[in-house]
Image (cartoon, helix red, strand yellow):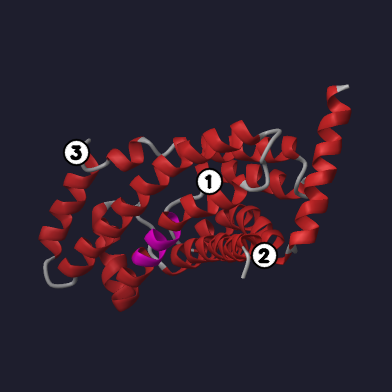
Amino acid sequence: MNTNTELERVSSTRRVLLALTMLVAPLALVIGHLITVSASEDSDALIRDIIAAGPRYVPSTILIAFGVLLLPVAFVGLMRFAPGRGGILVTIGAALSTIAALGAGAGNAMFGMVLGSLLPGHPQLARQVIEVAGNSSAATWEWQVFYLFPIGLVLMAIGLILARRLPVWMPIILGVGSILLLISGAGGLYTFVMLLPLAVGLAAPGVTLLTRSPAGRRRAAEAAAQVQHVDSE
């Protein structure tokens, strides 16, 4: 096997893995939020909901964390659609959103597993954990950088529009999903509905990346180069 063939094979494998991540991450995110309880309620209501949820609570928080922690890889997939024009915006946006995603993913997993291990046997201790988490800046640092997430997504959406490598509706719906993220709540059916545009905005480019052949990618690159040449004249 010659070097070029080997490189093409590695590139194809990497493309498929990135595309699958762009599908799996938003799917885990929306399903996890659909089956979990809302964490935006007061401590007593949250404890009752967690007890009522029973064995599905901890898996739901882990599923959410899994989806969030996969998002940085999905952002790398989005960067493949902006190799030139718009690429700087996509890269900066990916960096900002990655900072927020890593913090939120780790925090959500830790909080969910701690509460899941305390309930239903130790409701008083669980209430203390919730109060400490709500009042301590050190315990809520991941939410202090939360706004980097939608800001980064908006930058990525703008960069992808400028790149012209995807149907324009894909980055537009990604931008809409970024805004809806600010009012998406913290779990349940409402959050699931609010997160759907963001999920589609991430998954649709993943499908495009998964189904695009090497020849198709070359033609797209040539078309993008022609567009940039025309714009520069």
What residue range appears in magenta?
A: 62-68
What numbered label is drawn on residue 151? none
**Mark 1 crowdedness (10 Å alpha carbons): few <14, some 14-19, many ≥20:** some
Rendered location of residue 226, percent (x, y): 86, 37
Which of the two discs, 3 and 2, sits closer to the camera?
2
Q: Quadrant of the N terminus?
A: bottom right
The residue that mark 1 highlights is 181
| Viewer-proximal residue among 80 and 162 | 80
Quadrant occupied by the C terminus: top right
Residue at the spot of label 3: 136
SS for callout 2: helix
Q: Amino acid at mark 2?
A: Leu
Give the residue type at disc 1.
Leu
How far is the residue under mark 1 from the one under mark 3? 24 Å
Which comes before the other along the chain, label 2 or label 1? 1
Which residue is found at the position 25% from the left and 57% from the top? 110
**Lateral position of residue 114 relative to residue 141, left or right:** left
Q: State the residue at coordinates (45%, 36%).
A: 147
Q: Is residue 38 left or right of residue 176?
A: left
N-term mark: 3 or 2: 3
Label whose residue precedes the other's in the sequence (1 or 3) = 3
Occupied quadrant, residue 87: top right
Residue at 47 percent across and 41 percent down: it is 97
**Location of residue 205 in the rendering, given as x and y in whole percent from the top left corner:** 67, 56
Q: Residues within 10 Å of mark 2 (few under 14, many from 20)?
A: some
Q: Which residue is mark 2?
A: 210
Q: CA distance from mark 2 to mark 1?
A: 26 Å
Relative to 137, is 100 on the left or the right?
right
SS label for mark 3: loop
In the picture shown, does residue 233 fall above or below 130?
above
Kindly identify the residue that appears in the image at 64 percent across and 47 percent down: 174
